[in-house]
Structures are given as structure tokens and as C-alpha cells.
Image (cartoon, rainbow, N blue to C red):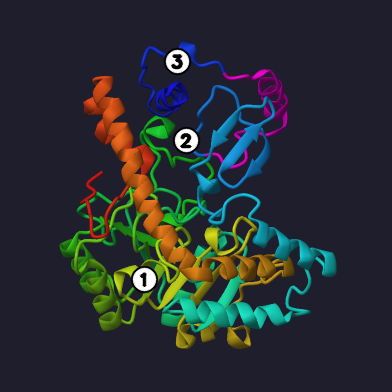
Amino acid sequence: MLKTLYLFNRLTGISTGQEDEIMLKKDKSEALTKEYNKYYPGGHSNLRIPMDVTEHRLFIAKSDGTHLTDVDGNEYIEYNGSMGPNILGHKNPNFVKKVVEYIENNGTAIGSNLLFSPMDVEVAKRLSELIPCVEELKFTVTGSEAVQAAFRIMRAYTGKNVIVRFQGNYAGWGDNVLGGRINSDVNAEIPFTDFSTHGGPEEDPYYTEGRSPLACKETIMIPWNNFEVLEETFDKYHDIIAGIHFEGIVWNHEGLYPKPGFVEKIRELCTKYNIVMCMDEVITGFRVNIGGAQTVLGVTPDLCTMGKAISNGIPVSCVGGKKEIMDCIRGNKVLVPGTYPGYGLGMAAVLATLDELTKDDCANRYSKYRKRLWMALWKSLESMIYHLQLRKQMEFLIHYLAFRVADGDYIQMEN
């Protein structure tokens, strides 16, 4: 209970008055933190959204399943899953066995379009069977990279330039997608995404210096679940809109489900105006369902981007979609080069992960267990907050816990 209160305090900044009773061993971690900070400005992945649960950095010495042990011997249960990739948990025996077997018999990276593996064909067949929109694939390494590849493909296929995005969707660290606001200038000829820096880092978690001033000309941002603005945007600007890229379930902002008919309306408008519909499945892929959010929602996009859970923590991502659109890459009309796309270790990890997720209906059973866990955690939090007379903080907590406990729930996001 005390450790739970400690995490509650660190996540919310709300004092419970009992934190001093918690005694975490931290000598080694504090020493390593000082050394680490000498060499790494801002950490490995630096955002302003608070995620630390201790004053010092946590240095993990051992991980197994959902359990972590730090260098000082403190033990933890991890609910983060490395922000999504570790869908099988740490050190899953079957996954480890298959990946190690590959490494013992092959190079970690072979190819870069010079050499290939039978795994390439097997991975493609498996994904095309599982994911409704996938007929062809282009592998990349990170989710951010897959998103930019999808943007290039959409622009090439349509001959248009602008991508529509929804407020609250995270699509990587690229200048044209990191943060941004809905354009409030009613006189703007085209309401391009507002990437202005007013407010600074204190008000905008995605504020960054060094962003290209040209990035704002690539996207239009609109509110999620707003039918009127969606239709108005497509009706007015369809001649410049190449595609729309969005999370079918907005896990990066409180797990927002679409209102009934909203994704269907996106599909209808994209078909009407020759606009590519691209669903971001980097988080939802294999996690909400083995077929992704598009299977849960029953709407098939033209393209999707995938990553994270596709390979259980080994860096792999991809763009998948309809042959007619993906064929832009054939004959090198669209270039998406790189050293690591389709690299051997990554493809072995994809196959090992899919083997586990498709075994005994694993992925769908996982989804059911996840909902049960969410409900139990939520009830525990309600009890704790009531006990501490902090019921007014419930809404605040949602921003950190990203819960959505039942299919079909939705919220209209205004800010």
C-alpha cells in the first residue's frame, strides 16, 4: 500500500502524508544517476510529460515477465511495457529461444535489399492474414519512421501534399507531427496546424526549439470525434489533402474511442474524395485485437502503420496496405531506403512474437485480461482516492492512467 501511495504521489504531485514511511534502497541508483546525467542530456526519450516515479533514475538489473529488480535490489511490477512493445513480457521463454536460435545461426543484420531470407515471405503472409488492410508491406525500424514513410506514399499516390491529423494523436518526433494545435485563425486561407511556440515549455509538453518553419505547411489538425469539422475540412480542402492519419482508438490521449459512425464517416469521405485513409496501429496493433483497431472497429483503412508490439521489443515497424497504393514503391517511384528495413533479427522477432500471439487465441485472451486488470486497478484507485479525500483529482488521474474500460466508450476532447 505504501509503495502504491508513493507512486500516486510521484505521478500526481499530490501529497498523501505517508511518503516518508516508504524506504527504497537507492544508493547505487543515485550514484548511477549522477554519472548518467553527465553523458545523456535529457535522457534517452525526452518529453515533458512526467513519467518518473522516483527522484533518481531507475536502473534495472534484472527483468522477468512483469517483474523488475533495480540495481539496489528493489522489486517492482511493471505496467508500462516499455510504452507498448513488450507485449509478451520480459524474457518470454519461447520468444527468447527462437530469437537466440536465429542469432546463433545468422547475422543480426543481413540484406539492406542485397540479401533476403525466407522469413521475409513468411512474415508478409502472416501479417496479410491477420491485418485486414494489408496486401503489401514496407518495413522500417521505428514508429516515427513508419509514419513518415506512410506520408510519402500517400502524397505520391494522390499527387497531393497535405495530411489531416487529429488533436491528441501522437505520431512520432518529426517536425511535421510532434504536437501542434488546431489553427484558431478564422481568416486563414488554409488552416494549417499551429506549431507556434507561444506559451513555451511550461504550457506545451510538445514545445521544441529547432522545428523547421516549413513543417506547418504539411498538415491540418482537427478535433477528434467532431463530425461537422471533419466533413467541412474534407469538403473545402479535398483538392490538397493527400491522406488522413489517425489512431483508431486514441491511446496516446486517454484511450478515446471514436463516436459511433465517426470512423465510418472518415472511410466514406476518403473514398469520395480520393484521399488515403491511414490508421496508426503502432500501439493498437496486436494489442486491442490480433487484427488491430481496424478489426475492433470494423472499418478497413487503405494503409496502416505498425510497430511496438509487432516484435516484442526488438525495433521493427512497417507500413502495410492495399496493393494499388503500396505499388507506388515498385520501380523505385517512391524511395524508402535504409540499412535496417527487414533486417534478420527483427524479422525473426516478428515471427516469434506472432507465434505466441496466435497460439491458443493468446492475443484476444490478453485483451480480456487487460480489461479485467483495468477494472480492478480503477476500483483500487477509487477506494484510495476516497479514503484520502481526493475525489476531485479523479479527472486529473485519467490523464496519467490512459484508461478506457469498455468497448464503445468515447469522450469529446476539447483541449
Front residue of 284 and 207: 284
Q: Residue at x 72, y 32 (%)?
A: 39
Q: Type of residue at label 3?
A: Glu
Residue 295: x and y in percent read 36, 72
> Residue 294 — which label?
1
Residue 290 belongs to magenta span: no
Q: Residue at x 35, y 39 (%)?
A: 377
**What secondary structure is marked by label 3?**
helix
Residue 45: x and y in percent read 57, 42
- Position of 187 relative to 149 (above/below): above
Q: Earlier in the sequence, mark 2 or mark 3?
A: 3
Front residue of 277 and 193: 277
Residue 29 belongs to magenta span: yes
| Residue holding disc 2 | 48
**Which callout, 2 or 3, points to the residue nearer the camera?**
3
User: Marks 2/3: CA distance?
Assistant: 24 Å
**What secondary structure is marked by label 1?**
helix
> Which residues make up the magenta segment?
24-46
Q: Residue at x 22, y 70 (%)?
A: 236
**What secondary structure is marked by label 2?**
loop
Quadrant of the frame with the C terminus:
top left
Contact? badges 2 and 3 (CB < 8 Å): no
- Position of 157 relative to 390 (above/below): below
Residue 304: x and y in percent read 45, 71
